[in-house]
Image (cartoon, grey):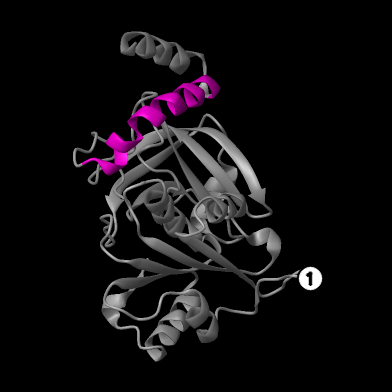
Amino acid sequence: MWIIMDQLLQIGHVEGYGVVVALASVVGIAAAAACIFSKRRPKGCLDPQKFKEFKLVRKRKLNHNTDRFTFSLPTPTSVLGLPVGQHIRCRGKDNEGKEVIRPYTPITLDSDVGYFELVVKMYPKGRMSHYFREMREGEWLGVKGPAGRFTYKPGQVRAFGMLAGGSGITPMFQLTRAILENPKDKTKVHLIYANTTFEDILLKEELDGYASKFPNHFKVYYVLSQPPERWKGGIGHISKDMIQSHCPAPSPRIQVLRCGPPQMNKAMASHLNDLYYTSEMQFEF
């Protein structure tokens, strides 16, 4: 069986990305536990010391300033090799041709074999934003990693509170996926996700799907500063009252994570301090 599967995967890798993803999904079902939950991690494609090039095979628009990028790995069974909670550094060129390097967190896990994905918000004057905006399918992205201060092991806390703004959802999404897709991990996740408009909410379909599928382990509360009519979520900015209502109370067995624009992170740190969350109970991506 595995000889036949290997032959099919080789054919799929030659014929195109669509076949690769379909076949890799089959392999991923069988290999998911070995990829991210077992003690023996498969060898990944990343190098923390030097950049490696990965090919862009699909680019999809999510809203007016955010795209979802899919990059292929060397083989249909390759894994990126990124520990949960870590990020990568991406290299590109700005509009003047000067090299620029920025950190990004993939929304995929090592159970996603053969590819990885980035969700990137592109700002009008962003130097790396220019590179991603101009990027076309078939072109290559320089990537180095893993990097980051956050490490995760299943069960290290009883529950996570998550305060995310805009594209700051990506590390929260990565961690949430790892928790919910591991049947042995009983950690609960309480996410408050803030944006300007309804259209700005990233990965909403996936988040709502998790909330529906795992109602006892995942809760999401959306906050909009410019909500549409009949909006039933939060309005304005994330407040102390919202944190008290939708995040786990201070305890040695919980942690509240935050990731968003600098002003938001500063405000959230102040809120958490006022609510008696100690420094050990907080982490900023």
The region drawn magenta spans: 18-38
User: Which residue is painted at 52% across and 29% down in the image?
Assistant: 138
Q: What kind of element bears circle 1? A: loop
The residue to which callout 1 is attached is 230
Residue 114, position in %: x, y?
40, 29
Q: Residue at the far right: name it.
A: 229
Q: Quadrant of residue 64?
A: bottom right
Q: Residue 220 in the image: x percent, y percent?
A: 54, 64
Q: Quadrant of residue 77?
A: top left
Residue 174 in percent (x, y) is at 42, 52
On the image, the x and y values in percent for residue 3 come to 32, 9
| Amino acid carrying mark 1 in the image | Arg
Image quadrant holding the C terminus, namely bottom left
Residue 237 on the magenta segment: no
Q: Is residue 104 left or right of residue 226?
A: left
Vertical order, 8 against 237 (above or below): above
Q: Pick the residue in front: 195 or 124.
A: 195
Q: Is residue 222 left or right of residue 80?
A: right
Q: Which residue is rendered at x = 41% and y = 36% of the image? A: 112
Q: Main secondary structure of the magenta part?
A: helix
The crowding category of the residue bearing disc 1, from other C-alpha atoms within 10 Å (few below 14, some 14 to 19, many at least 20), is: few
Q: Is residue 165 visible?
A: yes
Q: Is residue 181 above or below residue 280?
A: above
Answer left or right for 143 relative to 212.
left
Residue under the image location 23 percent in, 34 percent down: 43
